Image (spheres, rainbow, N blue to C red):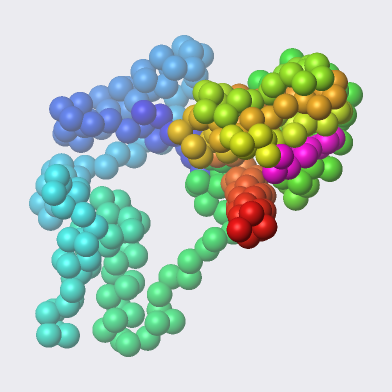
Amino acid sequence: MVVSMTKTHDIPALVLQAGGNLARDIETMPMAECEAWALSVVRDIFGASVPAPRSVERTQWSVDPLSRGSYSYVAVGSNTEDIAALADPVNDVLYFAGEAAYRHHWAGAHGAYASGVREAARILDDPAVLIPRAFTENRRWRDSMMRATRLFNAMSQSVGIEEIESRVGLLVNGDVFSNVPPNELRVLATMFEPVSFKENETLCELGAAAECIYVIASGRVEVRLGDDSVVATHGRGGLVGEYGLFQLGRRTATVVAVEATEAFALDYQRFQRFLLAFPESMFALLHATVGRLIAQSNTRAMRLVQTQ
């Protein structure tokens, strides 16, 4: 595996990672042979014109007498609580550091370092020694942004800019997507497919397989329960069909167009991909969905009281 440190550390270097017998051979072969191997790998990927590197460095953990290439792993039947147990001091006299004693970053050099700082803080009884944790940006956040960028680039090629902006105008006025930033809505807008329904035509049927959501562009739809009672009405910007995401792929109500209706459909698979790329949108959807469930529950309770 080849990792570009330009992406991670903004320095012009490549990291070549090898395992098994190859890793042991690389750590014991003459340095000139190691450099030749590294250059052959890079040229195999990027072409024969790649220049020789300015320098080559290698790890030699397998021949290090203090480690012999070992590192911890969580075995079958174990968990991170076992790692925490390894880190417990003995009578405030013997302290343990090392990646095997750090449950957050075990099996890595950064875990070994952080565990040493942790034990220093414990011995000194000074929390100020600990490394401050940063939440502004991390690898998961960067991966999320990369997924979103790739997704948008792929989808935007199939929908014109004017159409995208028109769909964004529709979504931003809805009760689910109104809090989603416009740039994120542009990504989502490219995924929808336009659909039309005649008056009295069914969009969703109670108990049927659920595969997509609908955003109403024009017209009006009613949400009906099994007793045919109407629990909600949606017009432009309204979202229906989202409950199927949480109900094992089954419709929880029947949705009928009470007049000619234009809508945009989005299948669950692509909708879920969007939600994974943009967690803020997921929370907006959950907030709206829970709100609707509470409203429906209150409506049913009032009808029950009236019936009694």
Q: Residue at x 84, y 43 (%)?
A: 173
Q: Residue at x 74, y 19 (%)?
A: 201
Please name whichever residue, 262 or 136, is drawn nearer the observer in this view of the structure. Answer: 262
Q: In the displayed structure, would residue 92 be above or below residue 108?
A: below
Give the quadrant of residue 42. Answer: top left
Report x, y in % for residue 46.
49, 17
Q: Quadrant of the C terminus?
A: bottom right
Q: Which range is magenta?
A: 230-239
Report x, y in % for residue 209.
52, 23
Q: Is residue 221 left or right of residue 283?
A: right
Can residue 46 be seen here? The reply is yes
Please name whichever residue, 227 or 159, is drawn nearer the observer in this view of the structure. Answer: 227
Please name whichever residue, 254 or 185, is drawn nearer the observer in this view of the structure. Answer: 254
Give the quadrant of residue 238. Answer: top right
Residue 233 lies within the magenta run: yes
Q: Residue furthest bottom?
A: 125
Q: In the displayed structure, would residue 79 be above or below residue 155?
A: below
Residue 154 lies within the magenta run: no
Q: Residue furthest front?
A: 308
Give the quadrant of residue 110. Answer: bottom left
Q: Quadrant of the N terminus?
A: top left
Q: Residue at x 81, y 27 (%)?
A: 258
Can residue 280 be seen here? The reply is no
Report x, y in % for residue 196.
79, 17
Report x, y in % for residue 140.
50, 46
Q: In the displayed structure, would residue 109 be above or below residue 191?
A: below
Please name whichever residue, 154 or 94, is drawn nearer the observer in this view of the structure. Answer: 154
For the stretch drawn in magenta, the main secondary structure is: strand
Q: Residue at x 32, y 33 (%)?
A: 17
Q: Is residue 200 left or right of residue 282?
A: right
